[in-house]
Amino acid sequence: MPQARGRAAGGGGGAQAGSADHRPLRRRDHHNHSEPSMKPTRHPTLTADGTAQARPDFGDPTVQPVPASVVEQVDAADVTLSNPKHAVISLGSNLGNRLEILQGAVDALEDTPGLRVKAVSPVYETEPWGVEPGSQPTYFNAVVLIKTTLPPDSLLERGQAIEEAFERVREERWAPRTIDVDILSYQGVVSDDPGLTLPHPRAHQRAFVLAPWLDIDPEAEVPGHGAVAALLSAVGHEGVAPRADLELRLPE
């Protein structure tokens, strides 16, 4: 995205996707949390105003948590806050420690007041989009389901703050980047607002978005375009390879 709305998180190449049966999937309920299979060691801290600051490495795989009183309010959003919305977020990285950066973005989303991460997709590896093959590192991509009381523009701002915290540089459209945080869908809203187009204008065309989205929600639809399963069948799996050896942890 030069902005979160209008950018693809990865790209298409020549890899072949495999069966979804062996891909790790993380989904939240209130009684069972899956154990992490990887332990990233350091992420920037996002303050309440969305700015980033360095923090010591304590071996904690999460972004530094918000105060307990705020956490309780966020937890309560699942059942008590007025009309929480469902949204779908895509993540992509092709610079640095890609898996650790994706995990840090998931954790930063979870640390956002008024937002709960409900499910995290398997990780996919894809070729960069819009550039010569082999000219950039491959992407790691994933999709996250969230429930939030934030309006779309505030969610966009949070995504951009996470990108800035991971030192995302916006130079050219298809340049490599440490992290993309894109809003794919927000409670079925369809909007051509130039500040935030919903759903993401190219989500229905990108296998590296559709494949993890289908894994995480087999009944998902892209508003105005149809079922994710049908869209993925139409575009095919070329350039999208599941990484069953990699796993993102659902925040506790």
Image (cartoon, rainbow, N blue to C red):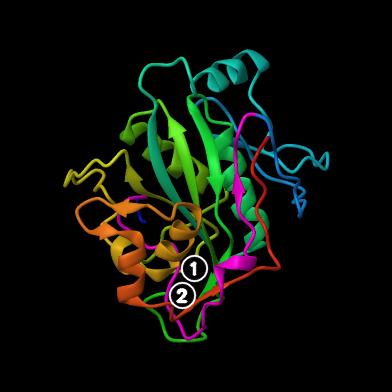
Q: Left or right? Give the position of 190 relative to 164.
A: left
The range drawn in magenta is 4-30
Q: Left or right? Give the position of 120 relative to 1.
A: right
Q: Is the magenta region chiefly helix, strand or loop?
A: loop
Decide whether residue 19 is among the magenta residues.
Answer: yes
Q: Position of residue 173 (x, y in %)?
A: 35, 66
Q: Position of residue 55 (x, y in %)?
A: 73, 37
Q: Give the crowd class for mark 1: few <14, some 14-19, many >=20 residues within 10 Å.
A: many
3D distance between C-alphas at marks 2 and 1:
8 Å
| Pointer 1 residue | 176
Residue farthest along the left direction in this orientation: 192
Of badges 2 and 1, nearer the viewer stands: 2
Amino acid at circle 2:
Pro
Q: What residue appears at the point 67 percent right and 30 percent down from the top-left corner? A: 31
Q: Depth check: give the residue in front, 99 or 157.
A: 99
Residue 128 is marked as 2
Q: What residue appears at the point 32 percent right and 35 percent down from the top-left corner? A: 152
Decide whether residue 217 is among the magenta residues.
Answer: no
Q: Depth check: give the residue in front, 184 or 97.
A: 184
Q: What residue appears at the point 63 percent right and 24 percent down from the top-left corner? A: 66
Residue 88 is marked as none
Tell whether label 1 touches label 2 (CB within 8 Å).
yes
Q: What residue appears at the point 50 percent right and 62 percent down from the top-left corner? A: 177
Q: Depth check: give the residue in front, 191 or 171.
A: 191
Q: Position of residue 166 (x, y in %)?
A: 57, 49
Which quadrant is the N terminus positioned in? Answer: bottom left
- Using the rendered view, name the quadrant where residue 13 is placed: bottom left
